[in-house]
């Protein structure tokens, strides 16, 4: 297979930039263009809910590369230009300004968009957190607030609650689950994390839904729950999930389900690939379709997409992995831990806040986890999970 003479990557965050860098490392010398809705230099997202939000990092520290490093790629960067349409057959992308960019191959790396609550856009003091500007706006809001309500008990909501609590705010976390991160970690480990938040002073309202936001004079004043209770708030963070950023692909000819549907090679159509949070791919080893929302996946999948663009025939078969930092807790999970699996502690002691666990379903290991035990989690991964 002859490599494409030109490649257009739509999205220049970790997955998009990682694909560009992998292409150059693998010897690609053709024309490379990165089109991005963000006006900023590419930056890392995990620090946004932690170090940047807390003020421990200046925004520039979250940049993935310096301007000099980006220049060395020999790629054209088009910033602040959202994609609005794709003609997959012609491999032509239309932007918000009406510009049409064509290439021999297109890589979709547009990531996620946060879900919102009805009426939130009309109220000051209500935030989502997806990009750098969101993090800076939320930090500014938290420095002027005393009471924060976080809607959403997933990874992002829990990290924001932990960061805000460390900043001294009165924090209430609201969620539909029985425990924090119950869907991702199962009841036993999630219960331990829930107690950690309670011990740090976070007020919890779990197993309930948000009915509405309340406000006065155009500013949020509280969160009304389906139980009838109203939680007073000076600031609210909506972290009720995200969805793949595929709205601009309607009518493109691509299959859109939970993301851009790809084959095992991350190919969505002839000459069109998807990478990162937006990509739904067939995992040949697991025999199922996956879409992974984490930083590690963005990096690993970019290597495979780049190789396949250049003529390889590599299936993408990762061991899923994610991590989260909350207070002094670092949780690292490999595989697919879930509520359905039975988690058993194999090393350490939960009461000492340092342990490792294995998840089993019907006697088969499906995931491993380390709670402040990164090395042991890696050992368990090597022992029990199928290698990439």
Image (cartoon, rainbow, N blue to C red):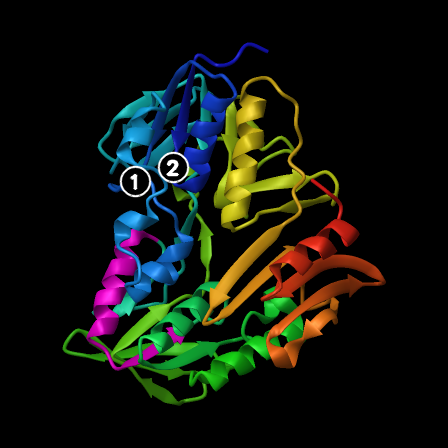
Q: Quadrant of the N terminus?
A: top right
Residue most toward the top? 2
Residue occupying image coordinates x 64% and y 73%? 189
Residue 69 spot, x, y in % from top left: 33, 30
Up-down relation of residue 359 to residue 168 (above or below): above
Q: Taking 341 as reference, is 231 left or right?
A: left
Kindly check if marks 1 and 2 are in contact, taking CB atoms under 8 A apart as contact. yes
Up-down relation of residue 106 to residue 194 (above or below): above
Q: How many marks?
A: 2
Mark 1 is surrounded, within 10 Å at the Cα level, by few (under 14), some (14 to 19) or many (20 or more) other residues, namely: some
Q: Secondary structure at mark 2?
A: loop
Residue occupying image coordinates x 74% and y 64%? 358
Question: Quick one: 382 or 215, which is closer to the camera?
Answer: 382
Residue occupying image coordinates x 45% and y 22%? 24
Mark 2 = which residue?
11
Magenta segment: 131-150
- Tell me, yes or no, if residue 123 can be seen here: no
Mark 1 = which residue?
37
Residue most toward the left? 217
């Amino acid at each position: 297979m002859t490599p494409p003479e030109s490649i257009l990557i739509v999205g220049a965050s970790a997955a998009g930039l990682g694909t560009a860098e992998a292409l150059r490392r693998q010897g690609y010398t053709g024309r490379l263009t990165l089109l991005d809705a963000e006006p900023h230099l590419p930056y890392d997202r995990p620090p946004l809910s932690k170090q940047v939000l807390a003020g421990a990092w200046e925004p520039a520290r979250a940049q993935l590369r310096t301007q000099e490093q980006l220049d060395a790629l020999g790629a054209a960067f088009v910033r602040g230009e959202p994609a609005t349409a794709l003609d997959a057959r012609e491999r032509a992308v239309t932007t918000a300004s009406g510009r049409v960019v064509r290439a021999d191959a297109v890589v979709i790396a547009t990531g996620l968009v946060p879900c919102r609550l009805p009426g939130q856009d009309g109220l000051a003091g209500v935030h989502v957190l997806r990009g750098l500007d969101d993090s800076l706006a939320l930090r500014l809001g938290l420095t002027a607030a005393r009471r924060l309500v976080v809607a959403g008990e997933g990874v992002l909501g829990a990290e924001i609650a932990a960061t805000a609590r460390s900043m001294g705010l009165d924090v209430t976390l609201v969620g539909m689950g029985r425990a924090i991160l119950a869907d991702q970690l199962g009841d036993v480990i999630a219960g331990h994390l829930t107690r950690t938040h309670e011990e740090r002073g976070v007020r919890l309202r779990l197993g309930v839904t948000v009915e509405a936001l309340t406000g006065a004079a155009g500013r949020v004043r509280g969160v009304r729950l389906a139980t009838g209770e109203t939680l007073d708030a000076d600031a609210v963070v909506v972290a009720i999930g995200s969805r793949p950023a595929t709205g601009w692909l309607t009518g493109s000819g691509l299959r859109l389900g939970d993301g851009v549907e790809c084959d095992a090679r991350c190919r969505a159509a002839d000459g069109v690939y998807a990478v990162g949070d937006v990509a739904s791919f067939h995992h040949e080893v697991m025999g199922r379709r996956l879409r992974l929302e984490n930083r590690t996946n963005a990096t690993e999948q970019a290597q495979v997409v780049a190789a396949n663009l250049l003529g390889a025939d590599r299936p993408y078969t990762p061991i899923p992995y994610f991590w989260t930092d909350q207070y002094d807790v670092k949780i690292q999970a490999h595989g697919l831990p879930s509520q359905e699996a039975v988690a058993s502690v194999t090393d350490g002691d939960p009461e000492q806040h340092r342990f490792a666990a294995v998840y089993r379903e019907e006697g088969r290991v499906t995931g491993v986890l380390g709670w402040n035990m990164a090395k042991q989690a890696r050992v368990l991964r090597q022992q029990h999970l199928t290698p990439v």
